[in-house]
Image (spheres, rainbow, N blue to C red):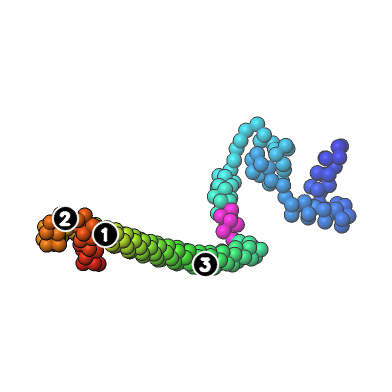
């Protein structure tokens, strides 16, 4: 008899053997094997007498069907039931999400503040640039007006100088003409006077041409008298 037969025989007899054998029999009955070929209890698939044919009882098939039908539900239950550790992780994730949301809100506030500050800075620079251009334009206009006034004053002085010089030249020409006229008139008057002296005075002084010395004396007197009258 083989060892397996002896083990099976010992298990079947049940009444023989010591108390320890009874305990082993109870454990084997508690751990009753199930055949995966015919779904019968008390033997394994490699010892199944129905190995060549598949004859499944309706009860077993329905039981297995129920087991198969329950299997997804049990999986779903396990899937939806979260352990305590997962709940803690989810709580941490929720806290982290809230922290991230608060950080994002604060970041958005700071970003809006920076944008507002940048906008104000740009507007201030634009105002400064506008004021600077306005000042430069006014300054350029003022300098241009001053230059125009200086040029006008310079031109006025130049014209006045030219006018004064022209008046002086005209006055000088007038004086020169007057002097020339006076000289000419003086010479004419002198010639007329001499001619009149010769015509009137000399004959009375020298009624005849007797005596050359007398005649010269009269002429000398006539010249001296004419010279005195000129003086």
Q: CA distance from mark 1 to mark 3?
A: 91 Å
Alpha carbon separation for disc pair 3 and 2: 146 Å
Q: Nearer the viewer, mark 3 or mark 2?
A: 2
Residue 4 locus on image (x, y percent): 83, 40
Instruction: Describe the element under mark 3 as helix, strand or loop.
Output: helix
Q: Which label's residue is closer to the chain start, 1 or 2?
A: 1
Instruction: Find residue 172 and name its label.
Output: 1
**Of residues 96 and 104, the one drawn nearer to the viewer in this rendering:** 104
In the image, residue 123 above or below residue 1? below
> Does the segment drawn in magenta span residue 137?
no
What residue sits 47% from the left and 65% below the top?
Answer: 121
Residue 200 x/y as whole percent: 11, 61
Residue drawn 22% across and 63% down?
A: 221
Comparing labels 1 and 2, the label whose residue is closer to the camera: 2
Closer to the camera in the image, 57 or 174: 174
Q: Percent position (x, y) of residue 24?
A: 82, 53
Instruction: Give the structural element (helix, strand or loop) at label 2.
Output: loop
Q: Nearer the viewer, residue 96 or 61?
A: 96
> In terms of depth relative to the viewer, which is nearer, 46 or 190?
190
Q: Which residues are magenta?
A: 75-81
- Per the picture, the main secondary structure of the magenta-coloured stretch is helix
């Amino acid at each position: 008899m083989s060892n397996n037969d002896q083990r099976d025989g010992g298990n079947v007899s049940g009444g023989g053997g010591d108390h320890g054998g009874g305990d082993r029999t109870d454990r084997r009955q508690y751990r009753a094997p199930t055949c995966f070929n015919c779904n019968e209890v008390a033997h394994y698939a490699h010892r199944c007498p129905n190995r060549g044919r598949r004859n499944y009882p309706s009860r077993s098939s329905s039981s297995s069907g129920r087991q198969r039908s329950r299997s997804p539900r049990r999986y779903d239950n396990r899937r939806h039931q979260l352990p305590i550790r997962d709940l803690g992780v989810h709580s941490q994730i929720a806290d982290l999400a809230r922290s991230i949301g608060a950080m994002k809100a604060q970041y958005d506030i700071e970003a809006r503040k920076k944008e507002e500050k940048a906008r104000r800075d740009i507007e201030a620079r634009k105002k400064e640039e506008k004021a600077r251009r306005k000042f430069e334009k006014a300054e350029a206009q003022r300098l241009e007006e001053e230059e125009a006034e200086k040029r006008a004053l310079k031109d006025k002085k130049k014209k006045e100088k030219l006018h004064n010089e022209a008046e002086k030249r005209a006055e000088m020409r007038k004086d020169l003409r007057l002097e020339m006229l006076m000289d000419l008139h003086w010479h004419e008057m002198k010639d007329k006077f001499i001619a009149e002296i010769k015509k009137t005075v000399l004959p009375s002084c020298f009624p005849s041409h007797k005596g050359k010395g007398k005649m010269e004396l009269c002429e000398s007197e006539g010249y001296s008298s004419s010279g005195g009258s000129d003086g």
